[in-house]
Image (cartoon, helix red, strand yellow):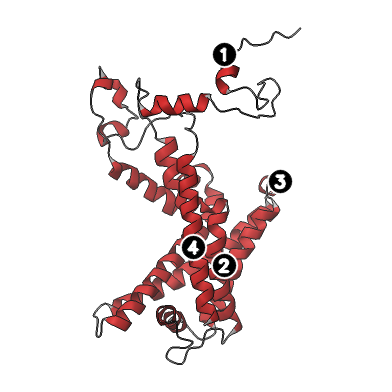
Amino acid sequence: MGFYLLTYACATVFLIAAVCRVVRLSSLPVHVRWEVYPVQHETASRVYYGGSYMEESDWWEKKQKRSLFNEFKYMAVEILFIRGLFKENRTLWLVSFPFHFGLYLMVAAFLLLMLNAVLALFVEGSIFIKPLDTLIIIAGWSGIVLGNIGCAGLLYRRLSDPELRNYSSFTDYFNIMFIFIFFLSALISILAGDPFFEGAKAYATGLITMGSSFNGYVPGSSISGTVSIISASLLAVYIPLTHMSHMFMKYFLYHSVKWDDAPNLKGGPVEKAIIKNLKLKPTWKASHIGADGRKSWLDIASEAPEEKS
């Protein structure tokens, strides 16, 4: 019972933390506009050469044509396959991709396990049980193998590459080792006698029934299984509380920051947001800015620059 309560508690904290992240990002002051093209929500005819709706005459009088599909199509490739890193640093991508994709596959495997448990409990004789079993095995094995390769590779790169080592903090190493413990314990579990994830399926069923055992499976009956359950549950809490939340926050960073090209029209929402920003009182450390916490951005921007002798 204790393992199930731990998993539920961690899942609850994950949801609360993720919602808090989204709410906080949504309530932050308007960002500095990038003006970087192409903007992916433009129609396909403009995206391919980096065009903009501002090319049209009297664009401010016309309704903008946007394509969320183009945004999601671009973001899906970037989030799943880390396309930017593939282009800029192929060597690092070789270890970063299996690390991230391994995590994604483990999330997919968990969702498949829960769906399998629901069907097994409430839909007798479901034709989807066997296909789900196959998908669980494929996603589980692939995710665990890729995750171990990625963790070991990233750890080696950070320790052996002088450039990476110079700006790697204790937190960076801790994050990798934390996730490595999960992947390694999961690998030991399946190699030690559970190659078809029967224990994982039983645990998923136990999460729904809150039973202490299912089909003879008792959570915590092996050290590796215990470590897998505890580390996976704690990871659900840890990830949204750290910078690793970028895995699901990338949507907002792309959609609401990088590709935000909403026009600044008189009396519009962008103008109101900018006016609100100008009232903020910054406390930057750079002395030449004069941001002492008493003057607003409007005061600072309105002042004539000081002459230096």
Residue drawn at (52%, 64%) of the image: 236
Q: Which mark is residue 302?
A: 1
Q: Read off the residue under disc 3.
A: 166
> In this rendering, does residue 146 appear at all?
no
| Along the line of sight, the residue nearer the viewer: 136 or 161 | 136
Which of disc 4 and disc 3 is earlier in sequence?
Answer: 4
Q: Please report contact status of discs 2 and 4: CB closer than 8 Å, yes or no.
A: no
Amino acid under label 4?
Leu
Say above or below: 40 vs 56: below
> Residue type at mark 3?
Asn
SS for tag 2? Answer: helix
Residue where numbered disc 4 is placed: 103
Image location (x, y in percent) of residue 2? 55, 80
Which image quadrant for residue 254?
A: top left
Which is in the foreground here, disc 2 or disc 4?
2
Q: Secondary structure at mark 4?
A: helix
| Marks 3 and 4 in Cβ contact (< 8 Å) | no
**Sequence-first tag of 3 and 1:** 3
Residue 273, given in percent of the width and then of the height, sits at 44, 29
Q: Residue at position x 31%, y 22% from top? A: 54
